[in-house]
Amino acid sequence: MNLKNQNNLPDLYSRVPIELNGIPLELLDPSNISLSDFITCEICLNILLNPICCKNCKKKYCKKCIQSYFKNQNNNNQNRCPNCRQNFESSEIDQTTKDLFNVIKLKCFYFNNNCKEILIYDNFIKHINSCEKGEFKCNTKNCYFVGYLDDIIKHLYECGLKNIECKFCLNNFPKILFYEHFEKCKNEIFPCIYCKEKMKKYKIIEHEKTNCLKYPIKCKNCGEKILRENLNSHLNNKFNCYENRIKKLEKQNYEKDETIKILFDKFNKLEIEFNKEKERNDNLEKNLKEIYFKVYDFNKINLNNKEKIYKNNFEDYENNKISNAIKNYTTFYNNNNNNNKNNEKKYNLNDINNVDNNFNNYKN
């Protein structure tokens, strides 16, 4: 029986959860049995589930197994590895073990219940949480029935604790008490809510559909609800019937017009707000442009000022350079004249010309 086809039994049953410390070794495909020594937990000796590794000795454990082991130990809050007895530091398993997990094939946990699926390691948990061959429990309060899918569906139709609603009083009763209540409830005397005639409850529904003169019936022509006792006269008087229909259509048109007016007013308000926002954005854009051009002009002026400063500094530097050269020349020339007078020597004309030439070259 397909689990997806049980739409008439929503939320009446649920899957029994499975808690595994490791994957039972018997689920390993026989073709992979030679790999079992490399993929088993050192504690539960089953196939590793959510494996972690000791950083010191490289032994591998199931996550739940090692956590349970630490809880049962009394080592002053020091978690020691079961193998190397050092402080346990977890690390990922090696790549070789990961590659082995990608190779192995596993049977379904419910293979004894005729589930013939052969699974890869990564899909094992996902499959057993959705396998139709698994165990289910009844969700009825105080009912503890557990069984396979076919058994649970059969049980749901027979469960004595399942609540059933009484169609007369609209109260819920467990199935084992419902039929007794139902026999009493349907024979109780109860007045019709329309004509107030008293009768047994089980007759009221039929009475309302066929005999109650005060029961409102919808006219097929105009859509108005007319009491059953007045329906024939209403249908015979076609003018009143069509007049009612016209009034109803006018009312509907009026309501539509009012709705259109409301929507139109909202549209106008939104349009006004949109125009305001647009104007505001235009002003912001205009202000940004003005700021941009001001900054541009400022930078341009600043650049020109810097060029002028550099030019003036360069001219001052050149002028100072020339004036220093002149001072050096005059000092040199005066010193030579003083030496000539003191020593009564005469310089050759060529020496003086060489000094003049050097000064002119320096100046240029």
Image (cartoon, rainbow, N blue to C red):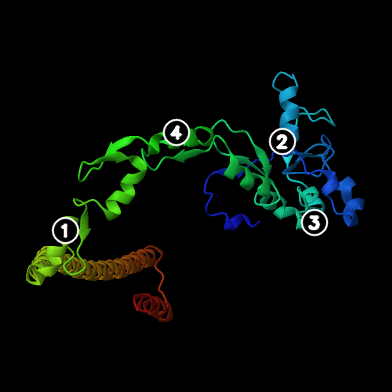
What is the x, y in percent for residue 201? 34, 40
Task: Check whether the beta carbons of the residues at disc 4 and disc 2 lie within 8 A of each other.
Answer: no
Reading the image, the residue beneath label 2 is 64
**Which numbered disc flags the more N-terminal residue, 2 or 1?**
2
User: What mark, if any, has residue 53 been given in the picture?
Assistant: none
Disc 1 secondary structure class? strand
For badge 1, the amino acid type reads Ile
Q: Is residue 38 visible?
A: yes
Q: Amino acid at mark 2?
A: Lys
Crowd class of label 4 (few under 14; some 14 to 19; many from 20; radius 10 Å): few
Q: Nearer the viewer, mark 4 or mark 2?
A: 4
CB under 8 Å between discs 4 and 1: no
Choose mark 2 or mark 3, whichever is in front. Answer: 2
3D distance between C-alphas at marks 2 and 1: 71 Å
Q: Looking at this view, is 266 or 91 the one in front?
A: 266
Give neighbour class at mark 1: few <14, some 14-19, many 20+ (Cα, 10 Å): some
Q: Position of residue 296 (x, y in %)?
A: 22, 70
Q: In the image, which disc is placed on residue 181?
A: 4
Q: CA distance from mark 2 to mark 3?
A: 22 Å
Q: Which residue is mark 3?
A: 99
- Disc number lying in front (4 or 3): 4
